[in-house]
Image: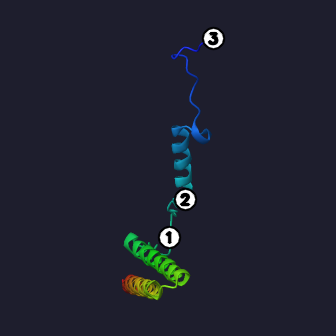
Amino acid sequence: MSISPLARPPRAQPYGFSLGGFAALVALIWSLLLPLPAVAAVSLHPVHLTPIATMSNHLNATAKDAEGKLESAYGELTGDTGHQIKGKAKQVQASGMHALEDVKQGAKEAAENVSDAAGRLADKAK
């Protein structure tokens, strides 16, 4: 008994997922991880959103810190002081990047607070 080449059994999907099912799973995970902004009908306090650039700079600093830790650990494992020093230097650079972003964010918040206070004072003067 021979099987005709046209009568092939259906292909099994890897891990039991079809491409559509995988896309749906990715969409579900993405929707759970993506924070949606909460909108209030009335807000007594202004909402201060962190700009994307600031978050990006913090992520860059965090990545630089992780890179420095890995390079330093590699240097310790291999006994290469050059990699140890480069790794520690990257960690110091990352600390400086974090500090700079924190100072920038603090200055922006202080400026917003002054602006809000001036606005309230102007409203009272009317």
Q: Find disc 1 in the rendering and name its residue.
A: 43
Earlier residue among tags 3 and 2: 3
Vertical arrangement, residue 112 with respect to residue 16, above or below = below
The image quadrant where one finds the N terminus is top right
Percent x, y of residue 37: 49, 62
Disc 3 is placed on an element classified as loop
Q: Is residue 119 visible?
A: yes
Query: Residue at coordinates 47% horizontally, 80% vertically from top-left?
Result: 68
> Residue 111 at x, y = what percent?
38, 85
Q: Amino acid at mark 1?
A: Ser
Mark 2 and mark 1: Cα distance apart in space: 25 Å
Could you say which is closer to the camera, residue 61 or residue 29?
61
Image x and y of residue 109, in percent: 42, 83
Residue that badge 3 annotates: 1
Can you say whether 18 is above or below 44 in the image?
above
Pick whichever, 88 or 75, lies toward us: 75
User: Local crowd at mark 2 within 10 Å, few (<14), some, or many (≥20)?
Assistant: few
Disc nearest the viewer among 2 and 1: 2
Name the N-terminal-most of marks 1 and 3: 3
Q: Nearer the viewer, mark 3 or mark 2?
A: 3
Q: Amino acid at mark 3?
A: Met
Residue receiving disc 2: 33
Q: Residue at x 55, y 17 (%)?
A: 7
Asked if marks 2 and 1 touch (Cβ < 8 Å), the reply is no
